[in-house]
Amino acid sequence: MQPSRSETQQASWEHFPHQADIGVRGIGVTKEAAFEQAGLAMTAVITDVDSVTPAQSVSIVCEAPDAELLLVDWLNALVYEMATRKMLFGRFAVHFSDHSLHATAWGEPVDVARHQPAVEVKGATYTELSVKQDNQGRWIAQCVVDV
């Protein structure tokens, strides 16, 4: 497991091994923070998150009947925005309302020389999909992304 740079903070992200694909896991004191960290974990599959300047904002809205499906929709919405806008995102604000997620993602256009993208994330999957609280009360949102 590769810990995030914010290991000493309450919120963090990490990768976990999964055959040819890669697992992303967001951890936070709230479900919103865990989803934000899962977004950062997905960006970190592609590039160093610290290299992404939060210069432009993009609004994202997703709806799903439960938190697990909402996580997949959220990450896939980020994949879509990255692909269509040719952007990377390095900061997120997530809010929930019933079965809806309302978020803002901040980022910038991909600069291949500076960002040196490692892989392209094709999408979030239902493999290892989980959104739950651990025995310490932290929220953990995870799934495997197809690269």
Image (cartoon, grey):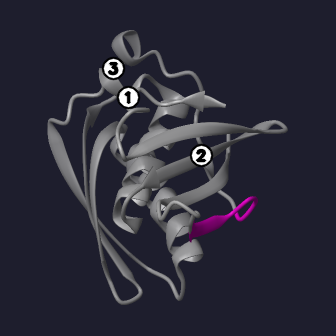
Q: Which residues make up the magenta segment?
A: 126-132
Mark 2 neighbour class, 10 Å CA radius: few under 14, some 14 to 19, many 20 or more: many
For disc 2, the marked residue is 24
Q: Secondary structure at mark 1?
A: helix
- Of residues 7 and 136, the one nearer the viewer is 136
Quadrant location of the N terminus in the rendered image: top right
Q: Secondary structure at mark 2?
A: strand
State whether residue 61 is above or below residue 118.
Answer: below
Mark 3 neighbour class, 10 Å CA radius: few under 14, some 14 to 19, many 20 or more: some
Question: Residue lying furthest right in this view?
Answer: 19
Quadrant location of the C terminus in the rendered image: top right
Q: Residue at x 81, y 36 (%)?
A: 20
> What separation in Å lies between label 3 and label 2 (alpha carbons)?
23 Å
Question: Residue lying furthest top in this view?
Answer: 113
Residue 79 is left or right of residue 121, and the answer is left
> What separation in Å lies between label 2 and label 1 (alpha carbons)?
14 Å
Q: Earlier in the sequence, mark 3 or mark 2?
A: 2
Q: Is residue 32 magenta?
A: no
Q: Is residue 129 magenta?
A: yes
- Of residues 13 and 108, the one nearer the viewer is 13
For disc 1, the marked residue is 49
Numbered tag placed on residue 147 in the rendering: none
